Amino acid sequence: MQFIIGVLLAISGVSAYGVYCRRKDHVILDIRNVLEDCRSLKSWDDRSELKLGTWVEGDERELHRKSLRVLKRILKEMIRYYQIHLEMADGEPYGTYQSQPK
């Protein structure tokens, strides 16, 4: 079965490396879309932008240099951070103190 799939891929001109590269491109696009969504939230601020380097494990412009496994992990974390910021946007601004009514 694997041999037949391999032959079909070879005949069609599709390589495993090409599939891998396309998959990486899709994951990078997903990361950038989530990042764009994060930046559109009110809770996303300069501090969040400073932390971005640790979240994407370096400069976001160098995502193409990361492996697919690392990119999937970054995407998972970026989705988690988006959810956190979305919850913060629905509530009070992060870090504010609300006094008790008298």
Image: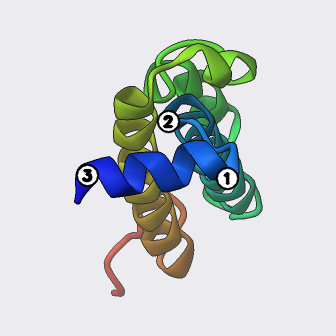
Dots 3 and 1: beta carbons under 8 Å?
no
Q: Is residue 12 left or right of residue 57?
A: right
x and y percentages locating residue 94 in the rendered image: 47, 56
Q: Which mark is residue 66?
A: none
Q: Is residue 102 left or right of residue 10?
A: left
Q: Find the distance from the CA under tag 1 to the CA under tag 2.
A: 12 Å
Residue type at the position of mark 2: Ala
> Looking at the image, which residue sits at the far bottom?
102
Mark 3 or 1 closer to N-term?
A: 3
Callout 2: SS: helix
Which residue is under mark 3?
2
Q: Find the distance from the CA under tag 3 to the CA under tag 1.
A: 15 Å
- Residue 48, located in which quarter of the rendered image? top right
Callout 1: SS: helix
Q: Nearer the viewer, mark 2 or mark 3?
A: 3
Which residue is under mark 1?
12
Q: Is residue 19 left or right of residue 102?
A: right
Q: Nearer the viewer, mark 1 or mark 2?
A: 1
x and y percentages locating residue 1 in the rendered image: 22, 60
Q: Nearer the viewer, residue 47 or 3?
A: 3
Residue type at the position of mark 3: Gln
Dots 2 and 3: beta carbons under 8 Å?
no
Q: Write the residue at 56% across / 71% down.
A: 89
Q: Write the residue at 54% across / 63% down.
A: 93
